[in-house]
Image (cartoon, rainbow, N blue to C red):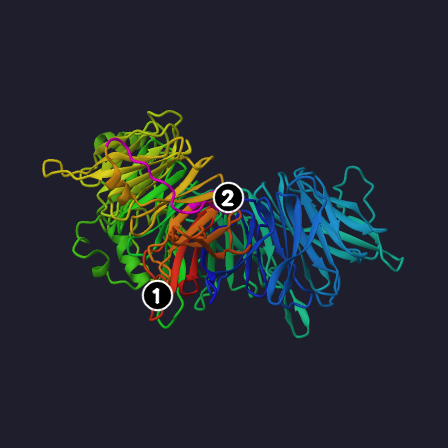
Amino acid sequence: MAATVEVCHVACCANRAGPGVVSWGRGGLLAFGSCRSVILYNPQKRKVVGTLNGHTERVNCVQWIHRNDGSYEAQLISGGSDKLLIIWETRNEELVNCIRLEGHTESICALDAIYLSNESPSEASVLVASAASDSTVRIWSKQRTEVPVLACGADDCKIHVYVQQAGQFQKTLLLHGHEDWIRGVEWAIFDEDLFLASCAQDCLIRIWKMHQTSSLLVEIQDDNAVRLKENIFTVKKNSGSDASFSVLLDSVLAGHENWVYAIHWQPSFFKDGRMEQPMRLLSASMDKTVILWAPDDESGVWLEQVRVGEVGGNTLGFFDCHFSPDGSMILAHAFHGALHLWKQTSANKREWAPEVMISGHFSGVQDVKWDPEGEFIITVGSDQTTRIFAPWKRENEAEVSWHEMARPQIHGYDMQCLAMIGRFQFVSGADEKVLRVFTAPKNFMENFSSISGISLDKLFSGQMIELPEGATVPALGLSNKAVFQAEGMAIETSEEEKKLSRVSSQYHENYFQPCSLTEPPTEDHLLQNMLWPETQKLYGHGYEIFCVACNNAKTVIASACKASKKEHAAVILWSTMTWKQLQRLPFHSLTVTQISFSPNDKFLLAVSRDRKWSVWKCEDTGPPEPEPAFSLFAYTNQNTALHSRIIWSCDWTPDSKYFITGSRDKKVIIWGECCSVEEEKENGAGVIQHCSSILDVGDSVTALSSSHVLAPDGSYIIAVGTESGKIQVYKWKPSDKNLPLSDWTKCVETDNSQSHTLVVKELCWRKCTGKAGQEAAESSKWLQLASCGADHSVKIFNINRDGL
């Protein structure tokens, strides 16, 4: 039986690329660009169902190509900063990279596509229009088209209307009115009339009506009179006859208080043998609101029907908005990539309730760890946030879905690393000189218990009373401050703090409000009600923190910072009992890239940019000195240094016998038993030889993790992450001394859709067998591996242990 790998969960968000990076298909699937990938998300299943990898730079725009008969789409088009358009086509129920359109010389920033007939997608020709930063609009088609009209919004505050004449698109009209950059335009057909909606940075929405006219209007010749002039243009049909069209400004919608970034008509649908277009319009603005507009039944005047949006948090409004195919849900794409979803309540059509939605980091994810019990993962990223993802267990459903449960830290510096100190306590490091320690508050524990189905007694027995209710961040502060009052919003402040508050009254402070949740939190809750109190700060490093680790007994923390000199490259040890510095371990001359304690806590391993590794032994100390002391035990020298480039990653085998190193030189090496070295060692540091053949994985090794569970044949299971984004799983077993070194066995490798599209930053195995939240009789069959990458994504893989 071959080993299999399946994607259990993908956490990600939409790119901050402006409007057009999200599209909702009639089949119910949401497609959006996330870093270099196009993500297919099913809002009903609340799960990523596909990842399309083909672009080599950021995806800026995505669109399902809507079929004229209202049936489900079979093609999707995407454009990116790699100057490339890709048409994805459904084959065997999967979207595949079908056609690549090259021609633009700069990043593609907008696109649209239509079918030119009612034929099946395989027979009908697609007409594509794309705009790029090279200041061109390009038209792509296999055949001549039937006089389509193209509208382009520009930074000259005008709408440029093009019509195809003699096989070429020619500018026929300029629509004036907006007073700032135009951000969105979209056509809709109502009866026999064509409507164009436009929005701009002047905070206004304009609706233009286009209809065929029989004769040109005659201008009033009196110079003193007010001139009323329709915008008229004439096109030549394929039959050779001329047709004149009139364009009038129908309505101006003023309701937003900031730039309007996107407008979309409610999707048309097939009814009684014809396509019907509902007269409803959705707009998204930087004022943090989305407005649903519709004409009044009696007067016909366009009025605001519904307004939804973000509340609180350090956010900057919305890039885009969409209706669901049936118009019962509203989606909004926020500036920081978050996707919001609201659903119309059946009781009151004017009430829209927030729904659970996919979420994730909006920049590179630097580190990921499982909690000691294997119930959730915690991540940190360059988007300056720490996030917790866990399975949501619902009654009468066998499968669980993973969701973001908390955002314990929203920081002012890019996050780099973290380590779990306990089940609900962690330490994190960022691009600052301080390590920060966080402990879960009572409100999180209660909500986590409710959502995960794990009882509070099992989670944190006997200590709930001592916990604060939640946390909040003071104005102009970086530290999460504990809130103990369950009912109060504000925290009692000193006179000095009150003076500072008055001076900085222009800075809004977000206060914690306890909430009782039965399902994963929405983005609004995550932004301001899911913080963990900061309980300690650890000072001692001279530069930005780069890596951190905690021993298995949860008594010692080891950390290192960026360094170009030996004095700053020392590893610092901290006590979790006193939170004081225990020891400095100087050896390396450049940045220590990763630190790892052996599972039995007897050894500490460090690897560095200086291409060396060092092993430190924990010395037994007597009662007067209860804290552990480490001494240099072994290290690489000129004779044993097998790595020729930066060593990025390291780990220990679960029995603490061997350790593993991975380097930019594409090599993975396992080094000999520390216990045998201990016996041979006399004076000074010992020498540890490699005991595996040198494994060349074909790409720079950036992450390593050894499973705590062995393969059925007793081999060690080792996951390797590479610079290209691929993850490979190997088995390794010490070989017989008399036999050739054929000790590595490659078991499985992620395919193109499963891999990251950029560097794999960290890998972490779940310590026990089974799927989190789904413990069952066959739990020993599965292993779970968490990964994070520079492509903004966090992934959890299920790997069949029986096939290893």
Number of numbered discs on residues = 2
- In the image, 251 versus 760, the foreground residue is 760
Please give the name of the residue rendered at 49% of the width and 62% of the height, measured from the top-left corner: 43
**Left or right of 294 in this view: 315:** left
Q: Which mark is residue 723?
A: 2
Which amino acid type corresponds to the residue marked 2 in the rendered image? Answer: Glu
Earlier sequence position, callout 2 versus callout 1? 2
Q: Which mark is residue 780?
A: 1
Please tell me whether the stretch drawn in magenta is mainly helix, strand or loop: loop
Is 407 located above or below residue 146 in the figure? Answer: above
Which amino acid type corresponds to the residue marked 1 in the rendered image? Answer: Ser
- Residue 509 colored in magenta in the image: no
Magenta span: 683-703
Is residue 481 among the parts visible in the rendering? Answer: no
Looking at the image, which residue sits at the far left? Answer: 624
Q: Which mark is residue 390?
A: none
Residue 394 percent coordinates (x, y): 36, 67
